[in-house]
Structure formats: C-alpha cells, structure tokens
Amino acid sequence: MPSVTGIAAAPQHLLSISRVALGAALWWNSRTSGDSEWALPAALLAVVFDVADGRLARARGTSSNFGRVIDNACDAAFLALAFFAFRAAIGTAPLVLFALSFGSYGARALWSAVARKPFTPSPRGHWAGISNYALAVIAAAQVHPSIDIPPPGLSIAAAIVVLMNSVAFYDNLRLARDDARSR
C-alpha cells in the first residue's frame, strides 16, 4: 500500500476536510438567517463527500487507519456543526446523544489503538451515522424557503436519531466491556 505523506497528498482527505467547512458554513448561516437556499445542497454535498472519500481512497490504494481517523473526525465535526445550526428545528437531544454515541466510539477506538488490540466497529453505530446524516439533510431541507416539511416529520426524524444514537452508545459500552474482559 502506498504511503500517504500528508493530508494534501491525498484528495480523499480534502473531501473529508471539506465537510468541516460545509458544517461551519451551515452554522455560520444559522446565526444570520432562518431560511437558506444553499443549506440543502451543502448538506447533500457533505453526504456525497462522505461516500466519495472512502471510495476514492480504496480506488487509489491509499486507504489507511489515518484516513479512517480523518474521516471519522470530519463526520463528527460536520454533524455536530449541522445539529448545532439546526437546533431550533430539531432540539438539542440529537446533538447530545450524537456526542455520547460518537464520543464512546472514539474512546473505544483510542483504547484499541493504545492497547494495540483490534477494533470492532459497531454495526449499530454505522446505522446511527447514516441516520445522523439523514437528519442533517432533512433539517437542511426544512430551512429551504420553497420546501415545507411538516413539523411532525422533522420531530419523528429527530426522535429516530436520538433512538439510534442511544442504541449505538449502549453498543459501544457493551463492546468496551467485552474488550476489557478480553485483556
């Protein structure tokens, strides 16, 4: 596998990092305006970049643990900024449960790296990640001036994300316990 000497050396890392910029733009716009014609395209672009960065890395033969760390960190930054930007529409519970779920995932990954143990990803965490991005897109659609999502639709999506992140948090705790027992 070819080595990657820096972030700029790999276009997939630029795709990952661009999600942070998109999240920051969503947050910045939420401070100045309620409606936004570009929030939905920005959220959809973040989804496309999230899918594309890993595929590009695998196609170029530059997939690495470093790249997975960058991808996960950029996911966390984008989603935290998006949830914070849309908190008036979705409430703060999705952000809090996302922080618990992703924080427990990050702690487990760090522990595995330090202990030099294999890391077991959580399938429930994967589905929670997909639901997090779906909520970001639905909330971005809600602030588009020509799209009207009924409030129950947004509330249901937010409740699903809270549930998915709660299950992922529990799963991360369970996997951490199992990892500790196998030491």
Image (cartoon, helix red, strand yellow):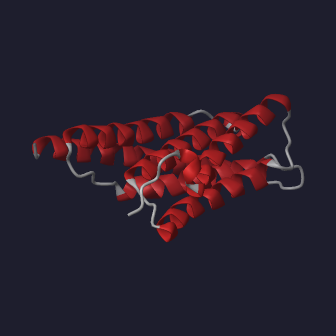
Q: Residue at x 31, y 48 (%)?
A: 171
Q: Residue 123: where, in percent of width, then height?
A: 36, 59
**Quadrant location of the C terminus?**
top left
Q: Does residue 129 appear left or right of residue 42 in this picture?
A: left
Q: Is residue 141 visible?
A: no
Q: Residue at x 54, y 46 (%)?
A: 7
The answer to whether residue 26 of the structure is visible from this angle is: yes
Q: How many marks?
A: 0
From the viewer's side, name the closer residue of 150 and 54.
Answer: 54
Q: Residue 105 appears in which quarter of the rendering?
A: top left
Q: Residue at x 75, y 39 (%)?
A: 25
Report the quarter where the N terminus lies.
bottom left
Residue 176's x, y, as percent? Answer: 24, 42
- For this rendering, which residue is in front, 57 or 2? 2
- Lateral position of residue 116 relative to residue 136, left or right: left
- Residue sitting at the far bottom: 59
The quarter of the displayed image where residue 146 is located: bottom right
Q: Nearer the viewer, residue 66 or 90?
A: 66
Above or below, 67 against 109 in this view is below
**Residue 31 percent coordinates (x, y):** 79, 29
Query: Outermost residue toward the right?
Result: 146
Q: Position of residue 23 (x, y in %)?
A: 67, 41
